[in-house]
Image: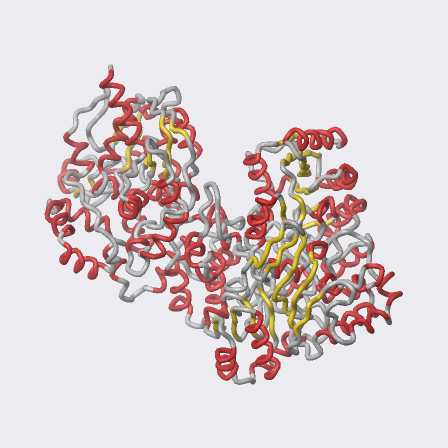
Amino acid sequence: MTDRGEEVAGDVRDADVAALAGALRKAVRGEVGFDVTARALVTMDASNYRRVPLGVVAPRDADDVAAVLEVCRERGVPVVARGGGTSIAGQATGTGVVLDFTRHMTALVELDPGSRTAVVQPGLVLDRLQEAAAPHGLRFGPDPSTHSRCTLGGMIGNNSCGSHSVAWGTTADSVRELSVITARGRRLRLGQGWAGAPDGLRELAEGELARLRTGFPELPRRISGYALDALLPEKGADVARSFCGSEGTLGILTEAVVRLVDSPRARALAVLAYADESAAAEAAAGLLPLGPLTVEGMAADLVPAGAGLPGGGAWLFVETGGETAAEARARAEEIVRAADVVDSLVVTDPAAQRSLWRIREDAAGTATRMPDGSEAWPGWEDCAVPPARLGGYLREFRALLAAHGLRGTPYGHFGDGCIHVRVDFDLLTEAGVGRFRRFSEELAGLVVAHGGSLSGEHGDGQARAELLPRMYGAEMVGLFERAKAVWDPDDLLNPGMLVRPARLDENLRFSVLPRRPVDVAFAYPSDGGDFRAAVRRCVGVAKCRTTTVSGPAVMCPSFRATGEEEHSTRGRARLLHEMLAGDLVTDGWQSREVLGALDLCLSCKGCRSDCPAGVDMATYKAEFLYHHYAGRRRPAAHYSMGRLPEWLRWASRAHLAPLLNTLAATRPLAGLGKHLAGTAPERDIPRLAPRTFTTWWRKRKPTTPGASPTESAPTSTPGDLVVLWPDTFTEHLAPSVGQAAVRVLEAAGLRVALPPTLLPRKGAIGDGRTRSAAALLTARRARVCCGLTYVSTGQLDRARTVLRRTLDLMEPVLRAGAPVVVLEPSCAAALTDLPELLPDDPRAARLSATVLTFAETLERHAPHWTPPAVDRPVAGQTHCHQHAVLGDGPDRRLRAAAGLTGELSGGCCGLAGDFGFEKGHFDVSRACAEEQLLPSVRQAPEDAVILADGFSCRTQLDQLADVRGRHLAEVLAEALDRADGGR
């Protein structure tokens, strides 16, 4: 077949791109981006495919859309409409001009509860519509797992479905009218009774009535091809419905009238356990007569440990609704009785239901890795068969996988016979791509043999359009081509999709990556040490583009602050991918485009836990900065804040804290200092403590029998010993936190020591062998350091030096096996990640394994200790690094035991170490704080304890809200002191 997409691209490459950009800028009011960054951000969607566009336009209204079409039509430039960019078949990519509807055309124009309709623009995110409809007891029926970032325009283009399709159908079932503009500039209002039909469409359909009545399989999830059967007279000659699922190839949507449905007042979730996925699949169809809202299935491969599901090898998630919680539960229990299950669970608590649904929704990203960590890709992501045939189909599908030596983990909409699966295709080698093609061709035959559809949700795109003749036959596909010609005779709208398609094994996004591994500093153990594989982790499901988060979620605060794709985790990953590809971003590690996108990354690590694919942008940023500034002058902030531990130790040794505090309080001098240091003029310089934590430690008297005030760790009774890490912030800026921790740990019966501080000039005192007086006399004092500030600014060579010195100092502690208590969550996370930077030093892994948070220490090593009763509500924020790397379960339990009630907010405080102090970051830093942290504090009861274990979080609260946040250790220590005073 002709690769129309590449053919058009070849034609366009000869055009005057500068003239095209200039004409568009004159014609539209929205943004026109022909720069490298704008283009790089839309080269891919969530599929295996990649196309480099000429430029991107963000239209402000329908007039802008019409103007773009006119300019591009005059020059023969193709146009591709793009919403959230989460399409899995490649239809949201193109070689011409991409229309980005997510910037401006995002309005909910009208919501009419009486008629149960809403008028929406194509860039409106589904969740925004749901939020507006909910107060009226209404909702939009279809709800893909990407509901927090997918747009209504994209849903209409793909005819999306989601988990509730057994109750409320596909997007096409919810569409009343559509406003579209054709490639030749006609504005049409599509509806029933041939409303808005372009010239020639009615004649085409009425001349093929027999074929339209017999040529389409009857099943609930038939998404493949054009829905020309909607034009049948007995179906109302519905032009709007026939337009749904056309993937932007017929016209450009500018507005839609959609139908809303009643939302059940109460819901219950029945989790049904089966021995395996085939048993679950065979049971699904039998549950449909009971009227469930969902019948979703997934197997154990995709379920994280400790998920709380009933015992089994596969599960059906069956949701029921009712006017009351009792009614919803009764329906769920009826389904349990009717189902032949291994085990079951009925959940009525909304929070618990959300947690379970999150497992299912994250499967699109979780499935990108096989259980052994190897990569898996879409390609046969959503084919559908009649629900009654799903069990048999799955068994044959598994057999076909095995015959080709492939693996995959099916999950999805079992009640509709629609299966999602990512397969461990090798799309990096010629042989692997050949197997991908052969498997695809054979699987298409298997789907058709079961009466199914090649696409049951995500559309055909490039992934399946080439195989449509196997499903429909050549004559029906020819009819599709004629319909396309009626709507778009010049073939300008998303060419290469659905008709005259590109081959399914062309334009693969992996083909442009380097063939050899890239030299990098981090070990990337989860990616086989391969930075290319780390970057490939981002598959484009775009959970990082969620505009609001609830609960403990963090990712991606910079995107929520700016709304710009380049400041999302996906956007940054796309730029890194293009950097490795080298044909669009051409200057590698020196790229200013990549640097610009990473500049507003807070290194919060939220993506590490919240991204279903496990992207770790904080590490990628540090890697990039390391290479970008190699042998070059760095920004001033890298020298001032990146080497903060050195400056603070120097100030401490010289006893300069009082003088520096005085200078910082003198406005002109402070302004000059901030200018020289590259810090934000809006920021106050934190005050240095007059006495460091270790100075206090050396002068204190032990309060627990047997406790030692010395710094080196004793080797006796290691079970009772904990080593308290004097991080830079606790040591120099907030020693009260360390003092409070000592008070609590000793009250809990633990023996506290600090790490050693003697480092020999030759050999290592910590090696267990150096004992000579000469070695001790010639040793120099040194301090342990987690290396966080060096890592976050990409000073990785210096970080390694600091960390090796730290490991030398910690030898006695490692030998004793004592736990290391780290009070600052960011430092604890840095130490946990230590093996990634020093993979060849076994001590790094040993130290990492000993790191505990304050709450973990009490839970593990003082399990019978009862904390003092505080009995007050709390507000504040869980530290983003704790959420992402460490977990906060022990903290929750400790707070509950102390009578500290309520939940801490999620998100990121916005200061994020050096980020919020860097010049140019203040506005974004404040916007991040205003998202969750500051509102939670303002709304807190007057007697609430404001908890913030991170120094950055406390500083942000102090400087933006004039509120003193406290570490949990401080709160418990104060309670202990009150109790002692009372006695």
At x 70%, y 65%, the residue is 246
Q: Which percent across, then down, holds residue 435? A: 69, 60
Q: How is the image coloured?
A: secondary structure
Q: Quadrant of residue 136?
A: top right
Image quarter hosting the N terminus: bottom right
At x 33%, y 50%, the residue is 911
- Can you see residue 845? no
- Can you see residue 127? yes
Q: Nearer the viewer, residue 827 or 808?
A: 827
Q: Quadrant of residue 898?
A: top left
Image quarter hosting the C terminus: top left
Can you name the residue that lies furthest to the right here?
A: 210
Q: Is residue 77 above or below residue 577?
A: below
Q: Which percent across, then down, holds residue 80? A: 60, 70
Q: Is residue 390 above or below residue 238?
A: above
Figure label count = 0
Q: Which percent across, then down, holds residue 451? A: 82, 54
Q: Nearer the viewer, residue 766 or 918?
A: 918
Q: Which percent across, then down, holds residue 147? A: 58, 51
User: Relative to residue 152, is residue 176 drawn left or right?
Assistant: right
User: Relative to residue 20, is residue 162 drawn left or right?
Assistant: right
Q: Nearer the viewer, residue 946 or 200?
A: 200
At x 53%, y 75%, the residue is 54
Can you name the residue that lies furthest to the top here?
A: 983
Q: Is residue 898 above or below residue 87?
A: above
User: Relative to residue 899, is residue 100 drawn left or right?
Assistant: right
At x 74%, y 28%, the residue is 337
Q: Quadrant of residue 12?
A: bottom right
